[in-house]
Image (cartoon, rainbow, N blue to C red):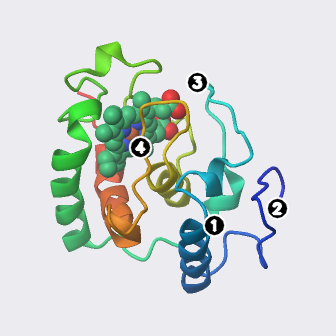
Amino acid sequence: MSKYKTPTPLPTPLPTPLPIASALLISALLIFPAGVLAHGDGHAHTDAPHEHKDFQGMKNPMAGNYKAFVEGRKIYRQRCAKCHGDTGRGDGPGAKSMTPPPPDLTADVSIHGSTDGEIFNVIANGVPKTAMPAFLNKKNLGESGVWKVVEFLKTLRGNKK
Ligand code: HEC
């Protein structure tokens, strides 16, 4: 489990094939508040690009799914644009007063890793001690909602003009 320490040992290390991974995520969330799962290791905030290896192998069930992208775009406008900006450059209203500020999502390199699984992790679990909220909770976006928005975010990359 490398550097990820969860309060109770999980039976298998993440990532695992999705059905098991989701069951683990969901059961972990029932027991612990969102955010504890991925960042319960006290992972301090850092601006330096880094990897979250445990999430790199996670399979995105909606990869390349156009409908998921369309729904993800809608979610982004409703839930994310106020901080990250309409075009993802981190220039939403209020972003200036945030420390750290919302990163530019059109950048080629993501601070928290650039694989689908790592992007899923950030959105699902949020980033403690920053304004980035956790969205995995079923009453929030739920797992499928998070993957949809991942599909949308991937299209922002390299979108610099
Ligand atoms: C209240 C403001 C706020 C909202 C709402 C918000 N974010 Fe964030 N987001 C942040 C901040 C601040 C960070 C920077 C965290 C850090 O520095 O580690 C961040 C980081 C991220 C990252 C990591 C980028 C990288 O370079 O690794 C992603 C991806 C992301 N947000 C996606 C989203 C998505 C998708 C939504 C909507 C579902 C969303 N955010 C909603 C403030 C917000």
The answer to which of marks 4 and 3 sits earlier in the sequence is 3
Q: Nearer the viewer, mark 2 or mark 4?
A: 4
Give the image location of residue 29, x and y in percent.
55, 66
Comparing 86 with 135, the one in front is 135
Q: Is residue 61 above or below residue 71?
A: below
The answer to which of marks 2 and 1 sits earlier in the sequence is 2
Amino acid type of the residue tagged 2 in the rendering: Met
Image point (54%, 71%), residue name: 30
Q: Is residue 75 above or below residue 31?
A: above
Q: CA distance from mark 2 to mark 1?
A: 14 Å
Residue farthest toward the top in the current orientation of the protein: 97
Q: Which mark is residue 133?
A: 4
Q: Is residue 144 above or below residue 124?
A: below
The residue carrying pointer 3 sits among few (fewer than 14), some (14 to 19) or many (20 or more) residues within 10 Å by Cα, namely: few
The residue carrying pointer 1 sits among few (fewer than 14), some (14 to 19) or many (20 or more) residues within 10 Å by Cα, namely: some
Q: CA distance from mark 1 to mark 3?
A: 23 Å
Q: Nearer the viewer, mark 4 or mark 3?
A: 4
Secondary structure under tag 4 reads loop
Amino acid type of the residue tagged 3 in the rendering: Asp
Give the image location of residue 11, x and y in percent.
79, 79
Comparing 97 with 1, the one in front is 97
Ligand 1 within 8 Å of the CB at mark 3: yes
- Mark 2 lies on residue: 1
